[in-house]
Amino acid sequence: METEQQVARHYGRSGIEQAILEALRASGKDVDHLAPGDLSGADEFHLGWQAATAELARDLGLGPELHVLDVGSGIGGPARHFAAAQGCRVTGIDLTAEFVEAARALTRRCGLAGLVSFCQGSALAMPFPDAEFDAATLIHVGMNIADKAALFAEVHRVLRPGARFGVYDVMRVADGDLPYPMPWAATPETSFVETPETYRRLLREASFTVEAEHDRSDLALRLGREMRERAAVEGAPPLGLHLLMGPATRERIGNVMATLERGLIAPVAMVARAG
């Protein structure tokens, strides 16, 4: 419980919706008529950003008939993308109250409240019935959860048999010290980066079958390089992840990208099927 409280404090920041709306106005957007893509500079809090979200949706075969659970939904970017692009119904759950509040408000502004809802809670004890969902996603969340065995068992509980589970996490692929702060943790005390082999084993032990695995390092590095080049010419955009990460954004992003370039970590997507 103490770790979860520390994680929630790490991400919690007041005034998220207002900061995003001000950035959108500065970018020339009509904040009363938003599309999900208008928010993608700030609401895709993971490596590969919206492109990686779209890849995961395709890997999972999401469609209008599905009810999808997004575990660790943040301010709702992936959930809104799934609903808008694939037409599915999405429920998000997140530890951080400020994220849930912003997710609900931004979803209403995008006209998606009928398809997407959010609740605050722990991924280790979710307030949902057994076999409630047709698919689930976990996007850059596992790095904050030490007990991944319990996490995967809980996700399996709320999925119907045969449902797909898409995991997209930063994973360790070589030995070496990780620098902090990182986007997901200021210190090692709340950082639990594991190897792909550990994920595969724990998913199997939770009665999942891993059907596909993709290393998205090339995508993340290419998009990161393009973003840096664009910022060098045009300056930093008003809407960005700095609205979520605050003053340490440059250091946190710099650390994760440098570690990715060194080959110590990789953003890895796995698609598993519930048995």
Image (spheres, rainbow, N blue to C red):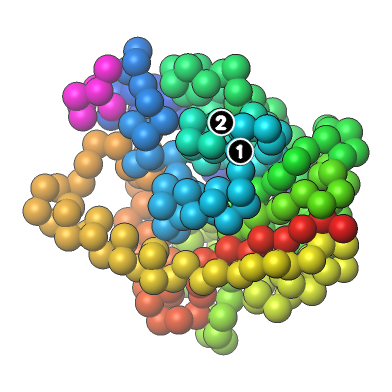
Mark before the other along the chain sequence, 2 or 1: 1
What's the amino acid at mark 2? Gly
- Residue 62 is situated, as x and y percent measured from the top left of the image, at 61, 43
- Say few, some or many: other residues with alpha carbon within 10 Å of mark 1 (under 14 / 14 to 19 / 20 or more): some
Q: At 49% across and 54% down in the image, what residue appears?
A: 55
Q: At 21% across and 29% down in the image, what residue appears?
A: 27
Q: Is residue 27 magenta?
A: yes
| Rendering quarter of residue 40 | top left
- Find disc 1 in the rendering and name its residue: 63
- Residue 76 is situated, as x and y percent measured from the top left of the image, at 53, 34
Relative height, residue 197 to residue 249 (above, below): below
- Residue 217 is situated, as x and y percent measured from the top left of the image, at 44, 70
Nearest to the observer: residue 189 or residue 268: 268
Query: Label 1 near label 2: C-beta < 8 Å?
Result: yes
What stretch of residues is rendered in magenta? 24-30
Q: Real-space Cα distance between discs 2 and 1?
A: 6 Å
Q: At 47% across and 17% down in the image, what residue appears?
A: 111
What's the amino acid at mark 1? Gly
Nearest to the observer: residue 133 or residue 65: 65
- Residue 108 is situated, as x and y percent measured from the top left of the image, at 50, 17
Relative height, residue 79 to residue 192 (above, below): above
Nearest to the observer: residue 80 or residue 1: 80
**Residue placed farthest to the top in the image?**
32
Of the 4 image quadrants, the one containing the C terminus is bottom right
Residue 8 shows in the view = no
